[in-house]
Every structure is written in structure tokens, then in C-alpha cells.
């Protein structure tokens, strides 16, 4: 005899399949309820499974007599054995489905732990966003920080606010580029300070002269000269000459390309450093900018141009200043008046957005005490409402001036 096993959602469906496949001779021996369909044991439906036999044609001497009771008993035993094996297989499948369901539940639970539900902002993200806004960071800068937090921090880490804010402070510090001057290809080294009116260029020039000339703050004393082309602002010439007299540093005043070139040539033989103070310009006046660039070309292509910008300037204006002074190919930015603000996010955002480095910081009017070589740490300790661990950030940023 041949054996068969068929499944269906109902008993009628199952019997109809048997009749269509095996004919009227097929005899059902065992019937049971099962679960069919689904994925990983999910979404299954209740169904019926039938197992039975199909009698073969017997030799002629048995024709008309039907199969003997003994034959049917043997076949029934075979069917029961087949059914037993199927039950075991079904049992193993059920065990597998249970394991799969358990794993799926664990994965779903882990997903809940790792991700904040859509539409909900984690309190740590909200708090960091508020502090970035408080420090006047630009919307674009803040978004990059918050997007990085969402990408790199699990829910478990976000729950540890101190750990998160320490990492955010590190990210801010790592976004600050510090200017490293290259050794001048030839003497003298020429530093030109450009920038808008009122940012403190003349005072900064005097501070630089005081640092490099007498050799303050551990530096080697250099032979320094100051040149000013700001002959139009009332008192500008007198101011720089007064600084020069106090420090015993010669000062020259020029107002055209030819005079500037001659003065540079005059100092070329025996001077280590020439500092050039310029007229404050309106960054929106392209004609003035072009005229200044033409005049300063007398200093030669090796001259270092540094842009002076006040820390008190709002972010959008800083971006415009950085952009409008691009024709000067300035090497770095000197941040002035840091003592006049408690927030530095505007400065750090503009520097990062425009890819500019910072070379010096000024934080007062005293010459030369209030001029400092740029470092990451002074910016970080000025961040408001962040818990700044001074020892930790000094260790993290040691060696990064």
C-alpha cells in the first residue's frame, strides 16, 4: 500500500484534496489538529492533517474478496509509525518556533532599549541642545553635534548625562583648529593684521611687538619693526608711535604702495620681524578691500596675513567678515576682546564652518599680558553651563596649542 499525508484549513478541504489526488480508494487512518503557515512561528492558522493509505491492486485470487484484516492491521501499524515520526518532527518544529519567538522578543526588547520612540527626544539630547543655544553656537553647528549624538550614543549611554556632556565638550575642542606658523623662508618674517574697524588691530599689533621684541613669555628677543598705514583714523598714528616709544621699537608710517615697499626693503637686512597695522575696512565695501589688497602686495607673497575679529561679533557677521576678507588669503584668525563676552559658540561655529584656524587670543587692554597664543582649553573653560573638568580636558588636549 501507498501512504499519504495532507493538510488543510478545514476537514472538508483536507478530504477534498485527498479525493482529488488519490481517488475514492484512499482511506484516512489518522486525523489531528495542527498549526500551519506563518513566519518564525508567528501568524500561524489552525488546520487539519490527515494521514492514510491507498490500497494497491491485489492478485486475482483475492479479487472481490478485499484485503484481509491482517493486511489492514499491518498497514495501520505502518501508518501509526509514520504518524509517530511526524509527531516528533512537529514537536521539534514547535521547539524551534518557541526558540525563534524567544529570540525575536529579545531583539525587539533590545531595540526598545537602544532607540528612543519616534517623535520623542531624549532628555539628554534636549538639554545639550539648550546649552549649545545658550552658548550662541550656530544652528548648523548644533545640529551636527546632536546628529552625531544620535548616531553614536545608545539609549543606555544617553542616560549617563555626565559621560555624554564630557564627550560633547571633547568634540567641540576637536573642532578648534590651532594655527601653526611655518618657519619663514627668508628674513624678515612679515605679519600683517587686517580686519574691520574697531576690533583692536592696533592694540594687538603692539601686544605682538611686546611679546616678540623684549622676548616676553619665554620667547627669544627679536629685532622688531612696526609699520602702520592707518594714517586716516584720528590718533591712530600717535597711538602706535606711543607704543613704539615705550618698547623702544621703531615705527614707520606709510600711505601708499611705493612707500611700503621701500620701507620693507629698508628693514630687510637686519630685522627679524615686521608687524604691519592696517586701516579698518568695511567688509561689505569690495572697492576698499581691493585697494587695501593692492597696497599690501608691496609686502611680498611670503607675508603672513592674519584676520582680527572680535569675540563679541555675532555669528552671522563673523561668517560675512571671514568671507569678505578672503581676497587677502589670511593664514589664521586672531580673536580679540574675549574678555568682553561670556559666550564663544559664535566664534567657534564661524571658525569651524569656514575651516579657519586661530593663532592668538586677546582678553584685555594690557600690553603684552593680555595676548595669548591660541589654545583649545581657554575656549572650553568659557563654555557656559557645561560641567568642565579642567584636569580631564588638559590631559585630553595636552600638546594641542
Image (spheres, grey):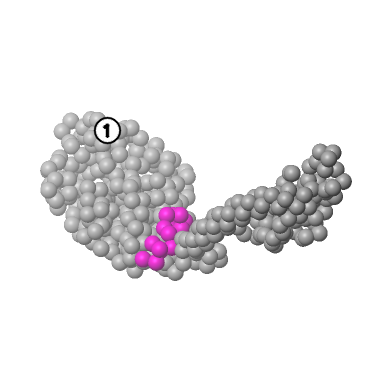
Residue 284 seen in the figure: yes
Query: Percent from the top left, x then y, of residue 104?
Result: 53, 58
Q: Foreground: 89 or 317?
A: 89
The residue that appears at 18% across and 42% down in the rendered structure is: 224
Give left or right: position of 316 versus 44: left
- With 252 as the anchor, is 94 left or right in this view? right
The residue tagged 1 is 262
- Magenta-highlighted residues: 141-160
Q: Foreground: 6 or 269?
A: 6
Name the residue at 25% across, 53% down: 396
In magenta stretch: residue 149? yes
Q: Position of residue 106 (x, y in %)?
A: 49, 61
**Mark 1: few/some/many CA within 10 Å (<14, 14-19, 20+):** some
Residue nearer the viewer, 385 or 179: 385
Q: Residue furthest right?
A: 64
Could one spot residue 311 in this view of the protein?
A: no
Q: Main secondary structure of the magenta part?
A: helix
Q: Indicate yes or no whether the magenta region holds residue 129.
A: no
Q: Secondary structure at mark 1?
A: helix
Residue 130 image point, x, y percent:
43, 67
Q: Position of residue 301 (x, y in %)?
A: 33, 32
Amino acid at each position: 500500500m501507498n501512504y499519504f499525508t495532507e493538510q488543510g484549513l478545514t476537514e472538508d478541504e483536507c478530504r477534498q484534496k485527498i479525493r482529488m489526488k488519490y481517488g475514492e480508494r484512499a482511506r484516512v487512518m489518522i486525523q489531528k489538529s495542527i498549526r500551519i503557515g506563518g513566519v518564525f512561528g508567528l501568524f500561524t492558522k489552525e488546520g487539519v492533517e490527515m494521514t492514510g493509505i491507498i490500497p494497491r491492486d491485489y492478485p486475482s485470487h483475492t479479487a472481490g474478496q478485499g484485503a484481509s484484516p491482517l493486511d489492514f492491521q499491518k498497514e495501520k501499524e505502518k501508518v501509526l509509525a509514520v504518524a509517530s515520526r511526524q509527531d516528533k518532527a512537529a514537536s521539534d518544529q514547535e521547539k524551534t518556533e518557541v526558540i525563534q519567538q524567544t529570540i525575536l522578543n529579545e531583539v525587539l526588547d533590545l531595540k526598545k532599549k537602544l532607540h528612543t520612540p519616534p517623535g520623542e527626544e531624549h532628555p539628554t539630547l534636549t538639554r545639550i541642545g539648550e546649552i549649545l543655544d545658550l552658548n550662541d553656537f550656530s544652528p548648523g553647528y548644533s545640529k551636527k553635534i546632536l546628529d552625531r549624538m544620535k548616531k553614536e550614543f545608545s539609549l543606555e549611554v544617553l542616560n549617563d548625562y555626565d559621560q555624554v556632556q564630557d564627550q560633547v565638550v571633547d568634540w567641540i575642542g576637536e573642532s578648534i583648529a590651532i594655527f601653526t606658523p611655518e618657519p619663514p623662508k627668508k628674513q624678515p618674517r612679515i605679519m600683517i593684521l587686517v580686519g574691520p574697524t574697531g576690533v583692536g588691530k592696533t592694540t594687538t599689533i603692539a601686544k605682538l611687538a611686546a611679546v616678540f621684541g623684549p622676548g616676553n613669555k619665554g620667547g627669544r628677543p627679536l629685532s622688531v619693526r612696526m609699520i602702520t598705514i592707518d594714517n586716516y583714523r584720528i590718533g591712530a598714528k600717535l597711538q602706535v608711535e606711543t607704543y613704539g616709544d615705550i618698547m623702544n621699537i621703531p615705527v614707520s608710517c606709510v600711505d601708499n604702495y611705493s612707500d611700503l615697499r621701500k620701507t620693507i626693503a629698508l628693514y630687510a637686512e637686519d630685522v627679524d620681524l615686521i608687524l604691519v597695522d592696517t586701516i579698518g575696512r568695511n567688509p561689505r565695501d569690495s572697492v576698499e578691500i581691493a585697494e587695501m589688497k593692492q597696497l599690501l602686495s608691496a609686502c611680498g607673497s611670503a607675508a603672513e596675513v592674519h584676520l582680527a575679529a572680535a569675540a563679541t561679533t555675532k555669528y552671522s557677521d563673523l561668517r560675512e567678515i571671514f568671507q569678505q576678507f578672503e581676497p587677502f588669503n589670511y593664514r589664521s584668525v586672531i580673536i580679540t576682546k574675549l574678555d568682553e563676552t561670556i559666550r564663544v559658540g559664535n566664534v567657534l561655529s564661524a571658525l569651524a564652518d569656514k575651516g579657519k584656524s586661530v593663532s592668538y587670543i586677546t582678553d584685555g587692554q594690557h600690553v603684552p599680558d593680555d595676548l595669548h597664543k591660541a589654545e583649545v582649553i581657554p575656549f572650553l573653560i568659557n563654555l557656559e553651563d557645561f560641567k568642565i573638568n579642567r584636569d580631564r580636558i588638559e590631559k585630553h588636549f595636552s600638546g594641542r596649542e
